[in-house]
Amino acid sequence: MRIRVAVAVVSGAVVLSALALPVAAQASERAGASAKLSSFASKTVRPNDSLGNTKFSHAVINGGKDIVLGTTGTKSVTVTYTATDQNGVALTEAFLWQGTDSSTTAGITGGLGTDDDPSCTETATQGVYNCKAVFNIHPATDMKDNGVAGTWKLFLGAWDLYANASYNDDVATAAIKKLSTLTADATPEPVKKGKTITVTGKLARANWSTAKYAGYASQPAKLQFRKKGSSAYTTLKTVKTSSTGVLKTTTKATVDGYYRYLFAGTATTAASTAPGDFVDVR
């Protein structure tokens, strides 16, 4: 993401101080990201009261869903929120960050900024603005450290029409998770009724450090079965992955149907479901 400098002119006389937004990157990879985020939260730009007069509410990150990232491509994440200030709102800024203290670079483990300034439109109620920010996240360059998967916070800042600054560094939270993949293969096929079949598979997840997918070890996955002609799966048993993410178990074949594995996900890895593999019972 680009570094942007925001400048606004109020009533033809007041100019807001220039603010360089962070390059969207994991902070430990690009120290400049955490430095610029912390500068906005530092005491040098805080108004007299700790959070300022602009209040932020109704924030929704990515439609309320987890942000799931693979190893390539771009993920566009929309954030909507309301900014309220009886002195008006000239400009808002948005960051996604991870850490314990937004005012120090040491307290920030991850920082993401927007390409463009958020757009805000005043509602029919004076001083109340509906705003939208878009984060374009590139996992190949922005998420170099696997350790940043997990909970991230929304940092919002604003200037009113008199150039007074406000901010809130924990308006809302969202989980940024690694994409996972899951397979299932039932053999032999066809099989005689009552005979044993073996269902193998593999659970893998995105590794942002290597830009590849790696087996996810020691994770529970449910083996499920759906009878031919039915739309509902039932759980047969729970199987744990090996050290390389491999799944393997056996079950009795009784009727034609589909076998699959289901992974519920974790705090850092998204859920996934294997496509059902059909077995013809004769």
Image: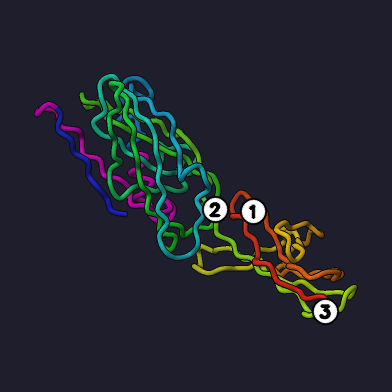
Element marked by disc 2: strand
- In 3D space, how far apart are the residues under numbered discs 3 and 1 (Cα atoms)? 32 Å
Element marked by disc 3: loop
Question: Is 282 contained in the magenta span?
Answer: no
Contact (Cβ within 8 Å) of mark 3 with mark 1: no
Residue sitting at the far left: 12
Residue 81 image point, x, y percent: 39, 34
Please tell me which of labels 2 and 3 falls first in the chain.
Answer: 2
Residue at 40% over, 60% down: 74
Query: In the image, what residue type sits under mark 2?
Result: Lys
Q: Is residue 191 left or right of residue 148?
A: right
Residue 125 image point, x, y percent: 31, 21
Residue 246 image point, x, y percent: 71, 70
Task: Decide: is 57 above or below 30.
Answer: above
- In 3D space, how far apart are the residues under numbered discs 2 and 3 (Cα atoms)? 39 Å
Name the foreground residue: 7 vs 127: 127
Contact (Cβ within 8 Å) of mark 2 with mark 1: yes
Q: Residues within 10 Å of mark 2 (few under 14, many from 20)?
A: many
Quickly name the residue at label 3: 191
Query: In the image, what residue type sits under mark 1?
Result: Gly
Please report the bounds of the magenta region as a residue range: 11-39
Quickly name the residue at label 2: 177
Quickly name the residue at label 1: 265
Query: In the image, what residue type sits under mark 3?
Result: Val
Residue at 42% over, 44% down: 96
State which quarter of the image contains the C terminus.
bottom right
Q: Residues within 10 Å of mark 3 (few under 14, many from 20)?
A: some
State which quarter of the image contains the N terminus.
bottom left
